[in-house]
Image: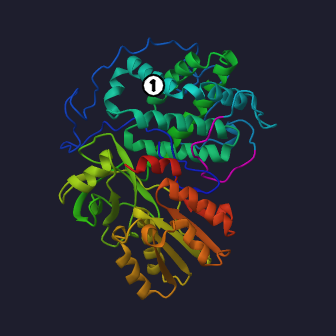
Amino acid sequence: MDAPTTTSAGNDGAGGGNWFTSHDRPAVDPYAGPPPGAPGGGQEPPQSRPPAAAEPRQRIRPTTESARPQGAAQPPPAGQPVAPDSFSSAAGHPAPGSFGRHVPPQRGAQQPQDASPDAIRIRGTMAEVGPIADKVTSYFYALLFVRHPELRSLFPAAMDTQRDRLLKALLTAAEHIDNPPVLVEYLQNLGRGHRKYGTRPEHYPAVGECLIGALSKYATGIWDRETEAAWVRAYTTMSQVMIDAAATDELRAPAWWHAEVVAHELRTADVAVLTLRPDQPYPFLAGQYASLETPWWPRVWRHYSFASAPRSDGLLTFHVKAVPAGWVSNSLVHRARPGDVVRLGPAGGSMTVDHTRGDGLLCLGGGTGIAPVRAMVEDLAERGSRRPVEVFYGARTDHDLYDIDTLLRLQQSHPWLTVHAVVDQRAHLQLPDAIHGHGPWIEYDAYLSGPPGMIRNGITALRAVGIPAHRIRHDSVEELVVAGD
């Protein structure tokens, strides 16, 4: 599951775990992994006997009239949008896109006064299993692979990130179960994003059945027939939203693109600028990101922001920093060469410029987080914008300002653009704090891109200078932890 960009009211959406990966491959497939059992292969050597499959008392079935569980919500036919009132009655509305790692409510914590009975039971379940979430998610996947062994080869060999994303998705659903506009938007993004993994409608009942099996095993203090029925109703409707969104998206875009590496420039020892040529037109907006899969790590996808605005030649540019133990990042920086072919998922994220507004832009980019900032500046320049833009480019050392020359050239050509370099070791000042000596920023929209810690500190600094939360946009903090690979 992919996390979208978010405003500062919460974090990203976008994203839980990608439950299924593509098994429709081209005739000549550069992603074919090693045989089962080999490193990076579709099968892991057995480490221990999987837990016995617990039979949930009510099975999730495909959403047909004859098979739908009694009392479950009645989702519309595939292809028709689910109305917001298909979920429980709405509570308060947080800012759109506020989907981060949220701590589940503690058992006995006060629920919102207008919380629906289903929401209370679902949140209670998540509070019950929160302290043992790792066991619950591990058991869920063991249950899924025991009952549906044909699905194991569709997942990455290492499942740690996968387990974290599943938990994040469940927490997000539990938090917003009474907020249909937010939850539907979130689920639609997931449904569209899952197309690149090869998710099909018939996969959802298997996932739902094993999910309820895992929850019923570990949420023993709260689990009863009413709680199970609440989960069945919620999951049935939620899965239908995702199925419908995927079906609609299939009519207008492929599930993924092949893209050839046409240029690979090593800017520092651990930062590379890659230029890719997709095999067909690839639509995106400056400020968005794409998920990439390399031929060396099949079924492992990581998010990277576009480092340029859409170009007439169709080429795409990405800045990638290799991090310790980063499978994808190290492959892209140290192994990829011109001629290699990667796969791209569809563009995502909403950290884009609203060109109907005339307010100034305050952009903070740390490290390779300067990539989407540069893309937005290029986009404004191509549109003939005259909006004031202040860019603060942060790095630990002067050497790490690998793209400063490009930004300074843009500044020379466009008087509305001002670029500030903030070097930690020289100024003894962290990037977010540098804005205090400038401004005022009351009439500015703010954009943050960089490591998770910089995003968190940046939100605090921006709020302190008077920029309201709804005018601060940034990548999902929790998704950045994964994208750091």
Residue 356 place in picture, x, y as percent: 60, 74
Horizontal placement of 340 versus 399: left or right? left
Residue 227 place in picture, x, y as percent: 67, 21
Magenta stretch, overall SS:
loop
**Quadrant of the image occupied by residue 43:** top left
What coloring was used for the rendering? rainbow
Q: Residue at x 64, y 30 (%)?
A: 74
Residue 200 visible? The answer is no
Residue range corresponding to the magenta coloring: 92-104
Crowd class of label 1 (few under 14; some 14 to 19; many from 20; radius 10 Å): some
Relative vertical location of residue 147 with respect to residue 265 in this rendering, above or below: above
Residue 241 place in picture, x, y as percent: 56, 39
Horizontal placement of 270 versus 139: left or right? left
Q: Residue at x 32, y 67 (%)?
A: 314
Residue 246 place in picture, x, y as percent: 47, 43
> Is residue 95 shown in magenta?
yes
Relative vertical location of residue 284 with respect to residue 393 in this rendering, above or below: above
- Relative depth, front residue between 282 and 157: 157
Q: Residue at x 49, y 23 (%)?
A: 135
Q: Residue at x 25, y 64 (%)?
A: 266
Q: Which residue is mark 1?
A: 138
Q: Secondary structure at mark 1?
A: helix
Relative vertical location of residue 44 with respect to residue 337 in this rendering, above or below: above
- Relative depth, front residue between 417 and 119: 417
**Quadrant of the image occupied by residue 64:** top right
* Amino acid type at mark 1: Ser
> Is residue 140 shown in magenta?
no
Residue 41 visible? The answer is yes
